[in-house]
Image: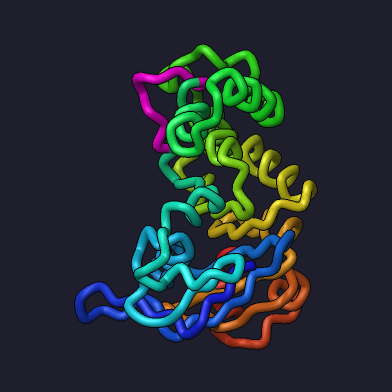
Amino acid sequence: MIDVIALEKKFGKNTVLKNINVNIKKGEVVVVIGPSGSGKSTFLRCLNLLEVPTKGKIIFEGTPITDSKVNIDLHRQKMGMVFQQFNLFPHMTVLENITLAPVRVKKVPKEEAERTAMRLLRRVGLEDKADSYPSKLSGGQKQRVAIARALAMEPDVMLFDEPTSALDPEMVGEVLDVMKELAADGMTMVVVTHEMGFAREVGDRIIFMSDGEIIEEGTPEEIFVNPKHSRTRDFLGKVL
């Protein structure tokens, strides 16, 4: 579904991603772990070209989206993204936040978009908050709305950039539960997270990054129980 080939990203003279090669299959949950500043979020943001790679190719569903002739907006519609900081519009209700993109971008009729939004709010356990404004929601509720908003575009893949790192500890579980359900339903997911329990339980494949490189990748068992690289062992020794 997504092929990343020889990806490199520089900010000025600073190389933050070095020769990244990854293949993400349909229905796979890939969890990216590693120390802060290792390039995890930059890698994720390159997948939908929120960050434009300096070198290399990204092929999404057969299309080289790094090619300047490609209309990235069309392909971005198929990639849902959930950020650390929810990014909800404060002046819109929860329902309006979720229906905005389907109505404006995909030209879905408003009534149909609202039906879909209510179904998604039920799915994330927030049906009763449809008419609330974001300021009235907890952090965990805002993030669940952000997930529903991304799902409203019916994406083929969901990208999560540390979706729980801005949350109070007691709210982390409610967001991870929604993500676990998505994974169980077969959604293709790429997740950057510090939640090692989630990575271990839900990930089909773990990618460990350090200093802008993929150091090691494998199943949760291979990475968490039997890591081969000393840098992976050092990192896990600090976080587990």
Q: Residue 129 placed where, x, y %?
A: 57, 16
Figure quadrant of the N terminus: bottom right
Q: Which residue is depicted at the point 45% across and 38% down?
A: 105
Q: Which residue is depicted at the point 67% across and 45% down?
A: 179
113 falls in the magenta region: no
Q: Which residue is depicted at the point 52% across and 29% down?
A: 98
Q: Which residue is depicted at the point 70% across and 77% down?
A: 218
Answer left or right for 6 relative to 202. Answer: left
In the displayed structure, 20 sits above or below 198; it is below
In the displayed structure, 140 sits above or below 57; it is above
Figure quadrant of the C terminus: bottom right
Q: Which residues are the magenta region?
A: 87-95
Q: Residue 13 placed where, x, y %?
A: 21, 81
Q: Residue 4 placed where, x, y %?
A: 53, 76
Q: Residue 177 placed where, x, y %?
A: 70, 40
What secondary structure do most residues of the magenta stretch adopt? loop
Dividing the picture into quadrants, the one containing residue 100 is top left
90 falls in the magenta region: yes
